[in-house]
């Protein structure tokens, strides 16, 4: 074992729709930490009690969950009560970043371009924004519940599907956002000695044209281009905007910020993910590797940051 690394409890699963993705991420994190020499404990959870968490080993907790409960505040509340250091955002920042509309308002406040959006009214069959639009849940990631609506027929189908989902899961909220046709870009952000810095930008080029759940986790035909050829200044603008937004939201340790680049060369902010995936398809580990930080070094560095012992980029 690496005496310089604390023991780690990796939490997986959760009650959200991204449960299967969480299991993959947690497995990747646990394997990487073991390669780095850490003592690792793994626990699959649903909605744990504080008593359940207190009974678990591990000096540092890594909540490798995706979705409203696992990365949107409720689990972070429990981890605060537990009193152990943990990887990722504290409750307030977790809630702000999980709320896609709150994130867009923060971006607009900072002067970062983001498209108009509003809450979907399940009782109103008319689309309040000009088509084309995108319909998606406010508090989910991994493209869960994503509907592309280029025309009125697609809007009607999306509205009906969202209504059915809201009926099946009371309290679920959907939003409508003006669609951007263009190139999907993402910027990973990491803690560097207590400060946030941007990793190399990645362009996502799905074979289907839409970076949906299947393209992210089920198929192998999506291409990922690290620091692709872009119009002058776009990469730097995205990197600066990503770090500024992460700071404004209070992000801690890591996040991934997504943009869409239109045909005029304008990047539009989409959302922030405060616990990005750590699967074989995941983008933040890919960007970190391109900057010389492989998975064991990346995971060890995040654990050290959580424990209060951050290291400079490239350290393990």
Image (cartoon, helix red, strand yellow):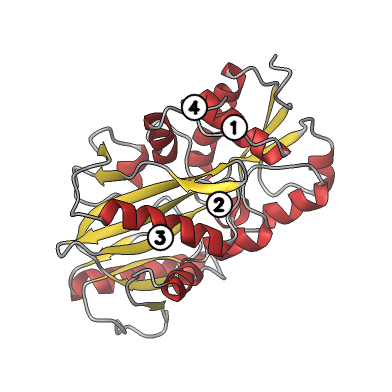
- The answer to the question of whether label 2 and label 4 lie on touching residues, with beta carbons closer than 8 A, is no
Between label 3 and label 4, give the one nearer the viewer: 3
- Secondary structure of the residue carrying numbered label 4: helix
Identify residue for label 4: 295
Q: Who comes first in sequence, dot 2 or dot 4?
A: 2
Q: Who comes first in sequence, dot 3 or dot 4?
A: 3
- Residue 35 percent across, percent down from the top left: 57, 17
Label 2: how many residues lie within 10 Å, few (<14), some (14-19) or many (20+)? some
Identify residue for label 3: 241
- Secondary structure of the residue carrying numbered label 3: helix
Between label 4 and label 1, give the one nearer the viewer: 1
Identify residue for label 1: 301
- Does the rendering let one see residue 212? no
Residue 16, disc = 2
Question: Is 116 above or below relative to 42?
Answer: below
Question: How far apart, in angstroms, are the residues tagged by discs 1 and 3?
Answer: 24 Å
């Amino acid at each position: 074992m690496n005496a310089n690394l604390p023991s780690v409890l990796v939490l997986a699963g959760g009650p959200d729709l991204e449960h299967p993705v969480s299991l993959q991420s947690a497995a990747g994190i646990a394997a990487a930490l073991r390669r780095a020499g850490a003592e690792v404990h793994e626990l699959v959870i649903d909605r744990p009690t504080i008593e359940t968490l207190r009974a678990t080993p591990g000096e540092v907790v890594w909540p490798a969950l995706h979705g409203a409960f696992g990365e949107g505040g409720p689990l972070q509340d429990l981890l605060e009560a537990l009193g152990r250091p943990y990887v990722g955002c504290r409750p307030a920042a977790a809630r702000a970043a999980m709320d896609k509309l709150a994130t867009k308002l923060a971006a607009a406040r900072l002067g970062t371009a983001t498209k108009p959006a509003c809450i979907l009214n399940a009782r109103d069959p008319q689309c309040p924004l000009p088509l084309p639009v995108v319909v998606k849940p406010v508090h989910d990631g991994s493209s869960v519940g994503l509907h592309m609506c280029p025309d009125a027929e697609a809007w009607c189908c999306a509205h009906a599907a969202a209504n059915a989902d809201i009926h099946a899961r009371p309290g679920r909220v959907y939003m409508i956002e003006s669609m951007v046709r263009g190139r999907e870009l993402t910027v990973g952000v990491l803690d560097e000695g207590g400060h946030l810095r941007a990793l190399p930008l990645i362009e996502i080029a799905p074979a289907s044209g839409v970076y949906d759940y299947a393209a992210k986790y089920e198929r192998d035909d999506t291409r990922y281009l690290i620091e692709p050829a872009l119009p002058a200044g776009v990469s730097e603008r995205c990197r600066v905007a990503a770090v500024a937004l992460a700071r404004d939201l209070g992000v801690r340790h890591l996040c991934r910020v997504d943009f869409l680049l239109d045909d005029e060369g304008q990047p539009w902010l989409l959302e922030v993910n405060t616990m990005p995936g750590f699967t074989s398809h995941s983008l933040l580990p890919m960007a970190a590797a391109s900057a010389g930080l492989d998975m064991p070094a990346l995971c060890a560095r995040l654990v050290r940051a959580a424990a209060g012992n951050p290291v400079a980029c490239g350290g393990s």
